[in-house]
Image (spheres, helix red, strand yellow):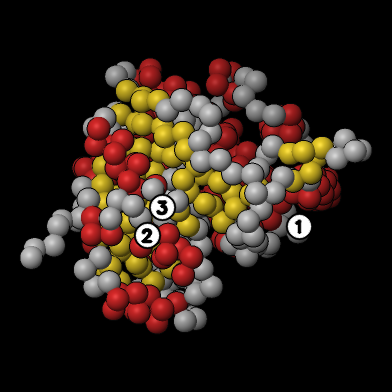
Amino acid sequence: MVAPMAKISIIVPFYNSEGYIERCMNSLLNQTIGLEWLELILVDDASTDGTLNLLKEYERQYPGQIKLIACPENGRQGTARNIGLQYATAPYIGFVDSDDWIEADMYEKMYEKITAYQCDVVYCRHIRDDGSGRIRDNRGNKDSSGNKEKQENVYEKATGKQDRLIVIESDRQREEIFVADAIGVGVWDKLYRRELLFDNHIVFPERLAYEDIFFGALIYLYANKIYILEERLYHYFVNWESTVLRMDKPYHKDIFTVNELKWQEFEKRGALKRFPMAVKYDFVKCYYLAGMKMLLLRYTKPSYELFLHIKNRVWELTGDYKENPYLKNAFPAVYDNLLGLLDVNITKEELWQLGDMMKKMSNINNTHR
């Protein structure tokens, strides 16, 4: 009997993930679409723990559905995903992170929508989950003192909103969808049509953190049909040991490199000419505001020299940001305060004080979630 051709290739990069493999793999192996229709591409990024041996056992048990690629050296998540793309054969492609997990019907529902509406991308909602059964939810009960308490076991798959199909037929529409960040830039909550990625040479920057920022932004340039599925089908693990939350790591500065690469790519692909205000808005938002948030929260003593450099880059590339219509009233007050730093001179000590203040605010917000 000839095995059916896979409908979906799912690429999962692993690095020292032995504590999370079973949860992630069980969610993939039990998909209601049927395992026979899935091609699971597991990429071990030169793990130094028992990850590779555990993955070999899964490959032994499911040789028809699992392809295991063992990288000889660590290339970070972008490299691992690009390697996985080279092995993908199905008409649709998804990504899952090794410490996350998914609802059993996620890929069945996404496949149904992407084929029924002939979409380039289907996007679903996600849940921030700490794995304890207590869902991190912005809704909260108030105790007798009026303080917000974190709700436990609050999780409904449906968001209460209507699904919607976005059909992009003009540059104006494309610009609006891009500025609105309608589907975010993460890759794990989406199913992509293969041709969208391969025909447009959309790949990840390699050996850099924050690689999704680059890949996800390019999707907005080429997707013509996007379906937003209003169900929470992906569990994003709130892992305090994850790359993005560790303190004083040099790779956090990759966010600036990735956004510089994105700017260059937008210029090369003509987006800067087609949507100049949108691209400049995106640079201020993702390079400066997201970068400043990272710099102030993820470093004990934020680099003053780097702060001065990124201020200069914003002025060099975007000109007078205050004249950009997309930046007017676009952000909460805390971000407006960061924007204000572009116009004033502060000392190194004042920058450090600002970092301490933002860390305290962040800790308070996390405590009351």
How far is the residue under mark 2 from the one under mark 1? 46 Å
Count of marks, rendered view:
3
Secondary structure at badge 3 equals loop
The residue positioned 36% from the left and 31% from the top of the image is 227
Residue 255 drawn above or below residue 240: above
| Quadrant of the rendering where the N terminus is positioned | bottom left
Tell me, for residue 104, which label it has, or none: 3
Where is residue 138 drawn, in percent x and y? 68, 39
Where is residue 184 drawn, in percent x and y? 48, 38
Q: Name the residue furthest right.
A: 145
Where is residue 97 drawn, in percent x and y? 45, 58
The residue positioned 68% from the left and 62% from the top of the image is 247
Secondary structure at badge 2 equals loop
Residue 159 drawn above or below residue 364: above
Q: Residues within 10 Å of mark 1 (few under 14, many from 20)?
A: some
Asked whether, in this view, residue 348 is left or right of residue 145, the answer is left
Mark 1 or 3: the one toward you: 3
How far is the residue under mark 2 from the one under mark 3? 6 Å
| Residue position marked by numbered label 2 in the rendering | 30
The residue positioned 34% from the left and 79% from the top of the image is 56
